[in-house]
Structures are given as C-alpha cells and as structure tokens.
Image: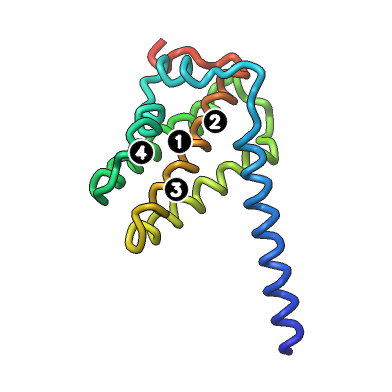
Amino acid sequence: MIASAIITAFSLGSVLAWFRYSCGLILSAKPAHDYTPQVAAANELGFLEVQQNLPQANERRVLDMLRKKLERDYHLLSYLLDHSPALHTGSEGFEQRMMMLDFELMKAYYALASLLSRSNARRALQEMTQVVCYFANTMGERGGWTSVTE
C-alpha cells in the first residue's frame, strides 16, 4: 500500500515536471514572425499593456485588475480561435490544449500566490501573459489578426 502511494506520488510529480518543462519550452520558442502586436491592436486587447505594467504592480488590487484584463483577452482569443470559420483547423492541437491548461493552472496558482507572495503572484501573471501572447501569435499565424468588429 505504501509502495503504491509512493509510486503514484512519484509518477504525478514526474508528469507535472514534464508538463511545466514543456510549457516553458513552448513559451520560450521565438516565432519567425511575431504577429502579437497586430492582433492586439486589431482586437483592442490589453495584454501588452499588462506585460508593461506588471513589474511595477505591487498592490493586490492592481494585480487583480491586471489578471482580469488577461482573462478577458484569453477568453476572447480562445473564442476567436475556436469559432472563426477561416481559422478553424478541425481540431485543437495538443500544444494549444497544453497552453489552455497552463493558463488555467496559473490562474489557480495566482489565486493562492496573491494571498501569500506578491512576487509569486506577478510570476503567475507573467506566465499567463505569455500564454495570451502565444494565442495571439497563433491567431496571427493563421491569418486571423483582423479586427473582431470588421
């Protein structure tokens, strides 16, 4: 019984370590062309502003406001990637699903970290910003960086 619990804990730890490492690799990859600014401007997204303001944010109220902006942008980009006929690829890629899970995990981590440590909360928001940038660039690569209002 104890051996089974140890093996299970070790396996879960290994999967979590692999997941975090893989997400880090995906987010650190530099695309040939970065469409992020065009997608952000065309759809009036605020994640680039969040990225700029994050290092100076110290109050929890400010961090929560930045989190809300990131969640709004994330949900908008997710919706556009899922529902735009010109962008729909038939099925989500494994990488995209990993990034969605990473965003949700960082959101949960932020909720805990914001109670304990502002620097850890900022790190969670920084990774959430990187995930939103990833989705914006993915949308741009697919040719869908035109405005939602067009």
For this view, does 72 lie left or right of residue 2?
left
Q: Which of the two residues, 79 or 26, is positioned nearer the viewer here?
A: 26
Badge 3 local density, few (<14 within 10 Å), some, or many (20+)? some
What is the CA distance from the residue labelled 1 to the residue labelled 3? 17 Å
Residue at the image position 44 percent from the left and 36 percent from the top: 75
Residue on which disc 2 sits = 135
* Label 3–label 2 contact, CB within 8 A: no
Q: In front of the other: label 3 or label 2?
A: 3
* Label 2–label 1 contact, CB within 8 A: yes
The x and y percentages for residue 110 are 41, 54
The x and y percentages for residue 9 are 68, 74
**In the rendered image, which quarter is residue 74 located in?**
top left
The x and y percentages for residue 71 are 40, 40
Q: In front of the other: label 4 or label 1?
A: 4
- Image quarter where the N terminus lies is bottom right
> Seen from this angle, which residue lies furthest bottom?
1
What is the CA distance from the residue labelled 4 to the residue labelled 2? 19 Å
Residue on which disc 4 sits = 54
Residue on which disc 3 sits = 123
Chain-order first, disc 4 or disc 2: 4
Image height check: is 128 above or below 109?
A: above
Image height check: is 80 above or below 27?
A: above
Image height check: is 97 above or below 81?
A: below
For this view, does 60 lie left or right of residue 136?
left
Residue on which disc 1 sits = 74
Residue at the image position 25 percent from the left and 43 percent from the top: 62
The x and y percentages for residue 50 are 36, 33
Which kind of residue does numbered mark 4 sit on? Leu
**Residue 121: mark in rendering:** none
For this view, does 116 lie left or right of residue 19?
left
Q: Secondary structure at mark 3?
A: helix
